[in-house]
Image (spheres, rainbow, N blue to C red):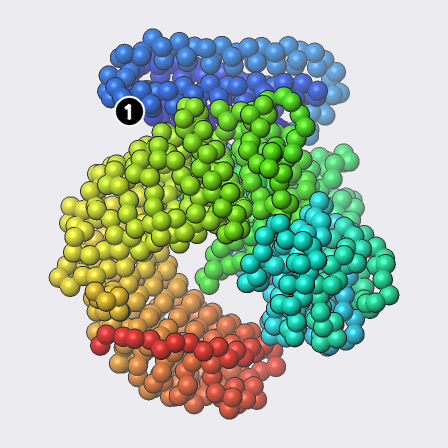
Amino acid sequence: MAVDAVVSVVIQKVTDMLRGISVTQNKLIVCQVREIMNSLDSMRDLLMTSVIPQQDDHYLDAVYMVEDGIEKFTLKVVCRRKVFGFLTNHIFFLDNLNSCFKINQKIKKITTQLMNLKHRENNPSFLAKQATDHVSFSYSCNEEVMQIVGVKESFQQKKQMSSFSYKEEELGIFGLKNDVEILVDQLTNNSSQHVVLIVGQGGVGKTTLARKIYKNGDIKQHFQFRVWVSMLEHYTTKDILLALMKSTDIVTDNKDDDEVMKFRLSEYLNNKRYLIILDGASSYNIWEHIKEAFPDVTNGSKLVFTSSQKVEMQTTQVTLFLHYMMPLSEDDSWKLFKDKVGTEKSWDLVPDISKQAILQSCKGLPLNIVMLAGRFAMITDSCSWPQVFSSMQNSMDVLTICYNDLSDNLKVCLLYLVLFPKEFDIPVRRLLRLWLAEGFVEHNSPEVFPEDTAQTYFDELVNRNMIQVSKLRSDYSPRRCFVLGVVHDYLSQKAKDTNLFHAYGNLINSEEDSCLNVRRMVEYESPKREQANKKQFKCSLFNPSQLRSYMSFNHQQTDYMQANRIGSFLGKIVDDGFGLLRVLDLEGVYKPILPENIGNLCNLRYLGLRSTYLDSLPPSVGELTNLETLDLKHTCIDELPCSIWKLKKLHHLNLNEMCLDMQLHSALKLLTLWGLFLDHKVPIKDGLDKLHDLRELGITFFLTSNQEDLMNWISSLTDLRSLRLRSKDNFGRPSKLMLQSMSNLGQLSHLNLLGKLEKLPDYKQFPPTLKVLTLSISLLEHDPMQTIGQLPCLTVLRLLGQSYIGKEMVCVKGGFSKLKVLKLWMLKELECWFVEEGSMQNLKHLEIRCCEKLHSIPTTLLQQPRLENLVLTGMPHAFAADVERSKSDHTSMTIKNWKFPSLHTNS
């Protein structure tokens, strides 16, 4: 697996090189590059049919050498072109041709060795076994994209076939309802049992159960303070204490003594009812070392451990509740398997012997069941099932079976998740853009954006249950994801085998004397205080010339040495001419120092500075000619160089209410432009209107005369999917917002508007695909519900602060047919709300916040059978009591007493 997966990534990079105009202007160079691709294809074919035992590392290193040669050659051409311009291909023609020839010779040498190895595989039975084991019934995104020949519609049809229907039910695992009820009752009944132990073998669902409890509405309301800590094997007492304190407002440092930290944490938790979940504890005896940090054990506070083994607690000072998680019965296992595969399958065609093979492989463990079901769900032809059953006859575990069934691109994309800390909630937005920057995503058709292909990769991995969705957006699209601990452990070894990345802490503590060719470096938030003589990278160990990515998860705001270390590290890379770096992801790192000549990193694709609170950016960032993503959201940066608009490959630009000097390049293909501040100095005609491909647009503007030009441009963005418009005056207060028809925006699903509206447009002027609508400070005088209720696809409606200033609101019969989420915030004048029978029949979540004059919630709504959650915030006690009496028993109710500042509007 290791070598052929890497070869697939290298082939994609050669494809990118072939596409690059600076390299391919000469036909002889093009022929050489195509020859390289052919040689790589031959190598991959041999790797897929050959066995590589002990020699695996040898071939892996050889393939990495080929990748290095390709990227160094490409980088050399780019750097020369910056100096010599269009003369580059003429001046350096022979040198370029010779470089391509050498790369091809390396590949052919490896291919020859593989052919010799294949000839030695002369055991017929062995070869037959290899052919059987290699059968793959995956619906491969990789293969599908290869079939695209410039026809965008073909891609869209296949995408619909493989797209995943993200539902709330998918966030949990079958069979946990009783466990949840038992534990929620145990945790909220103020019993004397302070510690709860959840015990079960790996894959039985301990972490999933703990997550469902942690997010349970009754739990949130019962406990004043909740903390989740994912335990790692090497965690010490200090590690746990630091992880706990991270969730508080206590300022701490790694140098603090353990006893001091316990005292400060205990002081913080005093008089609070708290819930602490330590997931993946290897030993409960750690309790003896941390118990002083947890006061008031008699006030209902709870500590929850999850572990794969039962370990007796060596203490008599605490009572505990032990909850065993048992594997599912055969009947429940088969039901879960069928549910996950899909009810449309022909189950009558499955013989009993095959059914037993599945049940024996899964062993009643939900993780095994859903993963194996994910594999079967990819099979479109039930006639192929017997072959799959046959391939299960060997003794491979379910994880290995499912992993081996992935295409090469999917394997590398899945392995990449191991770079994130265990149980880390990964923003899907971030993950997909990193895949793209690393070159893991195939994009062989100019008619299909790589972002679409990356999304299909993600969908398939979720469909296969290799990736779990941990948080959904309001429209039920995925916001965050993670891999379960058992899967993370399995993939970590695979990543190590492929030399995918190195952890900074392991490097500085390594005793090896040999030089490491590190391709990706990750720095985790390490609680341990490193020794002073190990603070700097060991030059004898670390060779930055091969580095492709640097990611940091050190988010401690007091660690100023981290900022300096990053600055010196990047400075060394730039000064030494090691420009292969593709990813620099510092999201959440506090004010990292960037070198002034960062623009020399010609290969950089991803620059993630979100939530770093940086004040400025080096002007040379405009020279990053290959940059695809620049994320400056939640920073203090207020200026970018004009040259930013010359970055032809820039697709995603996230800003923080920044005003830019717009000198747009006609070839710019931005897909995301978020956080732009627009005033009279920024041209719309012959400026912004040159951006035609936008999918996400977020603008705050101060305009009085040319709002019409702005709206005309927006109405022409037919690929737009998410739009946020905020109209403000020169004092920053909400101002007038003039809308035009958006009916031709056929893909727009999210619309967020802030500003005064004269009136709400007719429902036919809204995008026909609109799913989420948010209105703020609209100051609408006429009831908007009759218009909004006719939007055919609307699933989420947020009427926020003074969006409506009338006294009465009516929802007519048949309206809001697909609405699932409704939020009414700070509608200060609203008194009466009527909901007719047959309206909002699919509503699941209702939230009312600070609508003090509202008399009641309509009984027709409170009795809706699908209404699950009701949240009241800042509402009168009498109102809440009346709702409590009128609502159905199946509807959970949460009451909050938060106070909000008054909103200042400019009428």
| Residue 897 rendering spot, x and y as whole percentages | 51, 80
Quarter-of-image position of residue 15: top left
Query: Front-most of 296 and 395?
Result: 296
Q: Residue at x 86, y 58 (%)?
A: 314
* Residue under pointer 1: 82
Left or right, 13 with reference to 711: right
Is 759 placed above or below 284 here?
below
Q: Residue 789's image quarter?
A: bottom left
Which three-letter amino acid code belongs to the residue tagged 1? Lys
* Quadrant position of the C terminus in the picture: bottom left
Comparing 375 with 824, the one in front is: 824
| Above/below status of 485 relative to 29 | below
Query: Can I make out residue 369 in this image?
Result: no
Report the quarter where the N terminus lies: top right
Q: Secondary structure at mark 1?
A: helix
Of all residues shown, which one is farthest toward the left? 705
Res. 532 visible in picture: yes
| 274 left or right, relative to 583 | right
| Residue 234: image location, x then y, percent | 71, 44
User: Looking at the image, which is closer to me, 828 or 889?
Assistant: 828
**Residue 491, image x, y percentages:** 64, 39
